[in-house]
Image: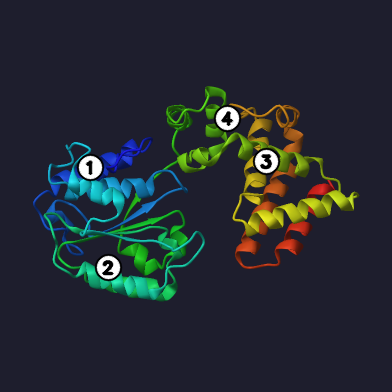
Amino acid sequence: MSTIPERPRGQDAVLARLESLAERSRGLEVPKVGDAAAHGGVPHAVLFVGPAAVGKHVAALWWARLFKCATEAKCAPACVDCKRIAAGSHPDVLALAPEAPGKSIGIDPVRDLIRMMSLMRMSAGPRIAIVRDAHRLTIEAQSALLKLLEEPPGSALIVLVTENPAGLLPTVRSRCQAFRFGAVPSEVVTAILLERGLERPTAERAAALAFGSVGKALALSPEVVADRDDLIFAVESLRAADPGDLEQLVASLVERRKQEKAGLEEVLQWTLLRIEAAHGHPPESESEKLGPILAATTERDVPRLLERAERVQWTLEALDRNANAKIAIRDLLLGVGER
């Protein structure tokens, strides 16, 4: 693994824009609000938006490297600035993130960040704050962050990274220039997995299941993929008249949610795959267990599958609002099993 932040793959268009901004700003202070054009075109606050695990946070570290590397990022792996950025120990590159997956970022860490951003820089280039999973900021924390966005120090650059911009206050979003990241092409994901030592069939299947997310593809071990196949097969085989199977599947999905493992999300993605297959666009690869189900899907199935997808999405939203997981999931599966 590299000891310096590398340019993420599969995001060439947005990275070219970021690289141009960094190059034009060398030797200049990062501007205050409304003054970007006079200072190399770099806004003082940016929003990196896109699906989960497509390289947004990696891009934030890589962009920080372009500003802070003493050798203009054309350095050897021994470069001190770049190694510190990768390790999270550079004095001018500050990181803020939830303490654990799914946790919120409260007001106290934001107050500490604001205080540290006001300190004198230790090296050339801006002092940079990278807020990962910015949608996890509480309302109070976002209100406090507004002070930094509205009155940033002259050398401040704030990077908010999120997969859910709707979780940010409109006043926060309006003070940031947005840079949108898309899904990573399947062939790029496959190449990354091959470099990690996976066999091509496994790499291609994981890339197809990851929907453009490098992070998800890397997490899809053969065991995880097999578990996903078993879950989906159980859903497809469900009959409401068999209460034993129903309760077993409900318990499995509830437990997955407690462990923050994909469950209903996989069912939703599979349902969308079936809809695409019905319209003549099957996935690049599928397992022997699920392949026949896809092959048998026709346009006559589309209305039922659309209804299922809507029900799964509604259930996920209800669970995010802290609905009773067991009741919500059972209601969903009762509808699926009746078909």
Q: Which mark is residue 151?
A: none
For the residues labelled 1 and 2, the Cα–Cα distance comes to 22 Å
Query: Which one is in front, 276 or 149?
Result: 149
Q: Which mark is residue 149?
A: 2
Give amino acid for label 1.
Glu
Residue 180 seen in this snapshot: no
Mark 1 / mark 2, whichever is N-terminal? 1
Q: Is residue 165 left or right of residue 325?
A: left
| Mark 1 nearby-residue class (10 Å; few <14, some 14–19, many ≥20) | some
Give amino acid for label 3.
Asp
- Contact check, label 3 and label 4, Cβ < 8 Å: no
| Residue assigned mark 4 | 205
- Contact check, label 1 and label 2, Cβ < 8 Å: no
**Mark 3 residue element:** helix
For image coordinates 20% across by 42% down, the residue present is 20
For image coordinates 62% across by 56% down, the residue present is 259
| Residue assigned mark 3 | 227
| Residue assigned mark 1 | 19
